[in-house]
Image (spheres, grey):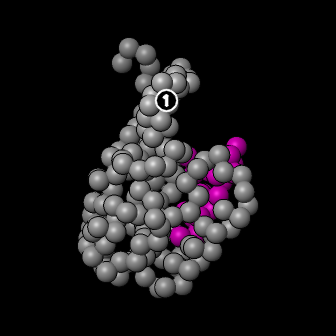
Amino acid sequence: GALVFGRGLIAQQLLRSSKRFGRSAIIAAGVSDSSELRAGTYLREHMLITKALRLKRPVFYFGSIGAAPLAPSRYYRHKFRAEKRIAKASRSNRVFCLPQVFGPAGNQHTLVNFFFSKLQKNERPTLQENVFRVLIPVHLISTLPSASFHSGLCGRMSVVHNVPLTPGQ
């Protein structure tokens, strides 16, 4: 079956169905907090990608919709470089760019868990006007690598983009 790197929400979901992904390496670990500043965290993900690529298996990586070479955030620049590196290494590799993933987990850095935590503490979360997010339940994620693996799709895939809406739509 597949090797799944990671212990978090996405990794736990993929571990349940890893046999469906053949002899692939699935990277569901690394930098997940877009406000991360520690260089060591980015280096650890870089080394994990190196390890996965050396296995000579198809690599599935979870990138970011916001990844861009000139992004103002270190996180998004790092994700862009990681996605490019993985896609360039082999046509068999796939990069999945997901919206906000949610499910039962303790990671307070996910959007839904952040709001849930605030509400549990009877605190009011700060909301910004005209900011929209697309959510995807974690149980749907295990279908993505499997579907692309069996269909022959490759490269960078944005699963769902944030859709700009105007008030009243």
Instruction: Work out whether residue 9 can be spotted.
Output: yes
- For disc 1, the neighbor class at 10 Å (few under 14, some 14 to 19, many from 20) is few
Is 67 left, or right, of 111 in this rendering? Answer: right
According to the image, label 1 marks what residue? 121
* 152 part of magenta stretch: no
- Of 115 and 4, nearer the camera is 115
- Of 70 and 57, nearer the camera is 57
The residue under label 1 is which amino acid type?
Lys
State the residue at coordinates (51%, 78%). 52
Instruction: Work out whether residue 95 can be spotted.
Output: no
State the residue at coordinates (37%, 63%). 12
Q: In the picture shown, does residue 141 fall above or below 47?
A: above
What is the quadrant of residue 99 in the picture?
top left
Question: Which residue is at the far front?
Answer: 121
Quadrant in which the C terminus is drawn: top left
What is the quadrant of residue 20 in the picture?
bottom left
Assign a secondary structure to mark 1: loop
Spot occupied by residue 152 in the image (x, y as percentages of width and height): 31, 70
Quadrant in which the N terminus is drawn: bottom left
Q: In the picture shown, does residue 14 fall above or below 50?
A: above
State the residue at coordinates (33%, 56%). 141
* 82 part of magenta stretch: yes
Q: In the picture shown, does residue 157 fall above or below 129?
A: below
Q: In the picture shown, does residue 133 fall above or below 99?
A: above
Spot occupied by residue 80 in the image (x, y as percentages of width and height): 60, 57
Range covered by the magenta-colored residues: 66-86
